Image (cartoon, grey):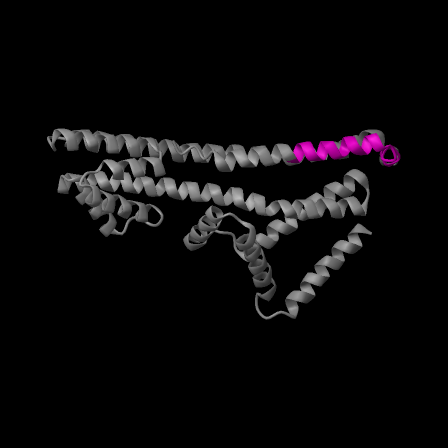
Amino acid sequence: MLEIILIGVVLLFIVSYRFSTGSGVYKFINESAHNLYDKYAPYSYKEMRAKIKKLGIDYTPRQYITQIVLIGGFAAGVGYLYFYSLIVAIVYLIIAIAMIPYITYLRSKRQYSEFIFEQIQVYVTNTIMEFSTTQAFVKSLEGVVSSGVLEDPVLSDVKTMIALSYEKGDVYDSINYMNTKYPFFMVKNMHQLFLQVTKEGAKDTQETFDNMLTDIDALVEGVYRDRMDRANFHRQFLIFGFALYGLAILIQLLVQIDTYISLLDNIFVCIALHLLVFINTYFLLKGERYYNENVGAE
């Protein structure tokens, strides 16, 4: 029965695609998903998605459909092989597809955080390099803005820093603004150095700034190395997590399928199996959240 339904779904998709113009099916699903995000997602999430889409690192409609098919199909397979019930398989399918927007949110948050870190690195490095020529903090900021190396939202925040500096007549409020908005160590250290230079006068600071640039390069190298290590661990974590779903298959091999199916008549066995699936799924989602939220920038 399950095989017939799956074949029917595939045939329905093929017929829909054949009678659509171009990539109409993909476009419809993509626009429907984005409309749902725009209606219910928080404003910060909409900003992240807009920036990620502009950067060209968002999933394509085909990739989203592939994700839905793989995750939904896997959930339906687990539900059926655990309980040999088409109803349970459909319920698991619906729950799995409902979790995809949350997974998308986590991935978007990580991508946006990595983009912000790269922009902050560019801001700090170029401000120090501009200062070696201008010997003035605000002029350095103006040089970074005019160079075109920054993108929003960091670009707009640097422009705000410049406006605050001219409005207040000093750099204290602008530095506090940037430190609060982007609490990275490299930002605070650079600003602290500029405050010291502002108070004591611009003396021979070239060596100090050169040392800071060297430290930033070492920090960035460490961050990218950490990202690669985390990505490798993440793949191993997912493999291990999905392998745990095979415990019920192992039990069936040990006690024979007929005996296993007879055990499903016991409500407590069914509850235990559902708990096994939900706990393992919770374990996977927690790991996915940790991987995407704790990007380890500094």
- Specify the quadrant of the image occupied by residue 253: top right
- Residue 267 placement (x, y as % from top left): 84, 33
Q: Is residue 69 magenta?
A: no
> Looking at this view, is 173 or 110 the one in front?
173
Q: Is residue 280 visible?
A: yes
| The one of 143 and 257 positioned closer to us in this rendering | 143
Residue 61 falls left or right of residue 261 = left
Residue 42 to residue 24: above or below: above
Q: Which residues are magenta?
A: 260-281
Q: Where 200 falls versus 161 (above or below)?
A: above
- Please identify the quadrant where the C terminus is shown: top left
The location of residue 218, given as percent across then percent down, is: 31, 31
Above or below, 12 relative to 146: below
Please give the count of numbered marks on the rendered protein: 0
* Residue occupying the point 67% across, 33% down: 280
Magenta stretch mostly in which secondary structure? Answer: helix
Answer whether residue 71 is visible to the viewer in this image: no
| Position of residue 11 in the picture relative to residue 101 (left or right) | right
Residue 270 colored in magenta in the image? yes
Apparent side of residue 226 relative to residue 83 in the rendered image (left or right): left
Residue 101 in the image: x percent, y percent?
A: 58, 47
**Which residue is painted at 30% across and 42% down in the image?**
122
Residue 210 lies, in percent from the top left, at: 20, 32
Residue at the far front in the pictured view: 168
